Image (cartoon, helix red, strand yellow):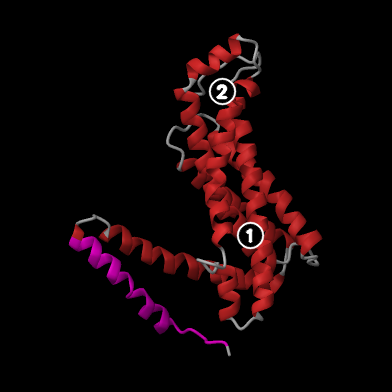
Amino acid sequence: MTITLTLWDVLTASLLLLITIGVSAYLRLGLVGTLIMAGIRTIVQLSMIGLILAWVFARESAWQVLTILTIMTLIASVSAKNRVKKPYAGLLLDSMLSLTLATSVVILIAMMVILKVSPWYRPQYIIPILGLILGNSLTAISLTSNELINALHDKQALIKSRLSLSATPFEATHDLVKLAILNGLTPTINSMLVVGLVSLPGMMTGQILAGANPTQAVRYQIITMFFICAGSTLSCTLSAMLIIRRFFDERGRFVLAR
């Protein structure tokens, strides 16, 4: 049996925010205004996307789906860029390239090889799966970018000394790149290690609540976790490579990106 939620149910659930607001007010965390705005935006944004998706699902138009996917990728790129504490000129473009290339590879494999969706752009599948991949990938490249950029600033003397000993830019920064990618992948790996034991992921929970067979819900969650892991890995690696390119000139000399 599927339980149909009414607007009244949603409004009642929103009252749970009063718990957080009360804690914030009592401890003077300064989050009351932010929480109220976050709650309002959650309701408005999700309601709007629900209407848009219902419209897109009814038509299954390739250009409409691709437009939504492009907008999602652009928003994720801007969000990833804004999370970097030491941005440089070209960071937004690098974030966009990393997310676009990584998610494109994974989503095409997912749609055409694993799920065998026909047509491959069916919005029922591609939009939510891309959203999951993008959401985790932007977090991964934000962590990678922050770690690597900070390391490049802090380890300038080490990098230059390695270059003076005939090391290539890749050799001079390999350990920094490795640590940055590991940092970016840590949240994804940690979630995979405890999935099903500590946490029940959103996709699986949503399908079970909607009345789906638990076995099928679990299988969907498994492949989704693998999609997320592959997307995060590719985006982290591409982001690190693009950042290194910005910090070295065409002759392989180390320069701080503006």
Please state if 17 lies on the left or on the right of 241 as rendered. left
The numbered dot on residue 225 is 1
Q: Is residue 165 above or below residue 32?
A: above
Pointer 2: residues within 10 angstroms few (<14), some, or many (20+)? some
- Residue type at mark 1 is Met
Q: Secondary structure at mark 1?
A: helix
Quadrant of residue 255 within the rendered picture: top right
Q: Secondary structure at mark 2?
A: loop
- Residue type at mark 2 is Phe
Q: Depth check: give the residue in front, 148 or 117.
A: 148
Q: Is residue 219 above or below residue 103?
A: below
Q: Residue furthest bottom?
A: 1
> Mark 2 highlights which residue?
247
| Chain part drawn in magenta | 2-26
Q: Is residue 241 above or below residue 233?
A: above
Q: Earlier in the sequence, mark 1 or mark 2?
A: 1
Residue at point 66%, 44% (across, down): 234
